[in-house]
C-alpha cells in the first residue's frame, strides 16, 4: 500500500446487518468550502506512532488524539485521559519555509522544538520526563 492509496475503513458490525467497506481518499474527504485539509502522511504518522509506542510501553503516555484542519494537523499526547495534552506535535505547512513545518508544543503553549525534520523534532518528546 502506498501513500496515494485510499485508506479503507471497515465499519463496526451492529446486529446482523452486512455492510460494505467504505473508502476515504484525500480527494474525496469532506472539506470546508473547497479548501484542502492538512494531514500527516503515512511516514509522518509512522514516526510519531513509533515514539508514542515506546512511551506507552514505558508507562509514561496513555492516550492520544488526532485533529486535522485547514491550517494545521495536530497529534496530541496525553499522560492520562484529561483535558490537556502533555505535548502537541503539529504540522503547519504555512511555516515550512520559515522555521519548519513541524513543532512540539508543551501544555503551557511554549514551543519545545521546531524544525524541518520531523525525526529531529520528535527527539524533544523523548527527552522530556514528567512526574506522575
Image (cartoon, grey):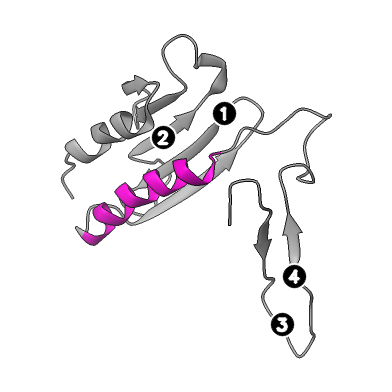
Q: Where does label 2 land, which residue?
A: 89
Q: Nearer the viewer, residue 118 or 130?
A: 118
- Give the farthest residue toward the front: 2
129 relative to 98 in the view: left or right: left
Q: Where does label 3 land, which residue?
A: 14
Magenta region? 40-57
102 relative to 125 in the view: left or right: right
Circle 2 — which element?
Answer: strand
Q: Earlier in the sequence, mark 1 or mark 3?
A: 3
Q: Main secondary structure of the magenta part?
A: helix
Instruction: Determine the residue positioned at 36% across, 20% down.
Output: 115
Eyeballing the image, is 129 above or below 71?
Answer: below
Residue 112, x across and y down, in percent: 29, 24
**Gap between marks 2 and 4, in whole Å?**
31 Å
Q: Where does label 4 land, which residue?
A: 21
Residue 117, x across and y down, in percent: 37, 26
Q: Nearer the viewer, residue 16 or 6?
A: 6
Mark 1 vs mark 4, foreground winner is: 4
| CB atoms of marks 4 and 3 within 8 Å | no
Q: Earlier in the sequence, mark 4 or mark 3?
A: 3
Query: Would you identify the image quadrant in which residue 94 lies?
Result: top right
Mark 3 vs mark 2, foreground winner is: 2
Mark 2 vs mark 4, foreground winner is: 4
Q: Earlier in the sequence, mark 1 or mark 4?
A: 4
Mark drawn on residue 72: 1
Eyeballing the image, is 98 above or below 39?
Answer: above
**Gap between marks 4 and 3, in whole Å?**
14 Å
Task: Tell me, yes or no, if residue 81 can be seen here.
Answer: no
**Gap between marks 3 and 2, in whole Å?**
35 Å
Mark drawn on residue 98: none
Amino acid at each position: 500500500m502506498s501513500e496515494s492509496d485510499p485508506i479503507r475503513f471497515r465499519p463496526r458490525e451492529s446486529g446482523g446487518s452486512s455492510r460494505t467497506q467504505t473508502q476515504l481518499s484525500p480527494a474525496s474527504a469532506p472539506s470546508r468550502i473547497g479548501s484542502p485539509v492538512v494531514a500527516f502522511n503515512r511516514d509522518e504518522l509512522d514516526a510519531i506512532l513509533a515514539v508514542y509506542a515506546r512511551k506507552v510501553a514505558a508507562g509514561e503516555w496513555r492516550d492520544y488524539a488526532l485533529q486535522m484542519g485547514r491550517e494545521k494537523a495536530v497529534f496530541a499526547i496525553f499522560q492520562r485521559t484529561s483535558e490537556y495534552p502533555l505535548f502537541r506535535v503539529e504540522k503547519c505547512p504555512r511555516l515550512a519555509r520559515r522555521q519548519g513545518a513541524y513543532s512540539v508544543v508543551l501544555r503551557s503553549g511554549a514551543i519545545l522544538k521546531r524544525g524541518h525534520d520531523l525525526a529531529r523534532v520528535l527527539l524533544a518528546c523523548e527527552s522530556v520526563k514528567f512526574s506522575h
